[in-house]
Amino acid sequence: MHLNQPVDRIIEQIHSLNRDGCIAELRGIQTPRLDFSDEYLDAMTLDQLRHVLMAACLQARRAPGHRRAS
């Protein structure tokens, strides 16, 4: 997922993801460092996964060195 997009576009993309897509995106986020066990993620609902992914994306956008869209 490209984090340089406007936030509303990121929200649309996250909303379109299925469970496996959300987990794959969570696993791919470098900063902040996330350490969720497979069991923990499996116990979450799709809506919960989407919320956690959105929060992680917003934090990743704030990370030092992240380039913002102009």
Image (tube, rainbow, N blue to C red):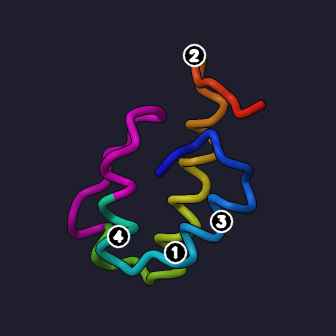
* Residue at the disc numbered 1: 48
Q: CA distance from mark 1 to mark 4?
A: 13 Å
- Secondary structure beneath label 4: helix
- Secondary structure beneath label 3: helix
| Amino acid found under the numbered disc labelled 3 | Ile
Q: Earlier in the sequence, mark 3 or mark 2?
A: 3
Badge 3: residue crowd in 10 Å (few <14, some 14–19, many ≥20): some
Nearest-to-viewer mark from 1 and 2: 2
| Amino acid found under the numbered disc labelled 4 | Gly
Q: CA distance from mark 4 to mark 3?
A: 14 Å
* Residue at the disc numbered 4: 21
Left or right: 16, with 4 as reference point: left
| Amino acid found under the numbered disc labelled 2 | Gly
Label 4 close to label 3 by CB (< 8 Å): no
On the image, the x and y values in percent for residue 10 come to 62, 58
Left or right: 58, with 47 as reference point: right
Question: Residue, x 40% and y 77% (percent of image)?
Answer: 44
* Residue at the disc numbered 3: 11
Give the numbered dot on residue 65: 2
Please tell me whether residue 37 is drawn above or below residue 19 in the rendered image.
above
Q: Earlier in the sequence, mark 2 or mark 4?
A: 4
Label 2 close to label 4 by CB (< 8 Å): no
| Amino acid found under the numbered disc labelled 1 | Gln
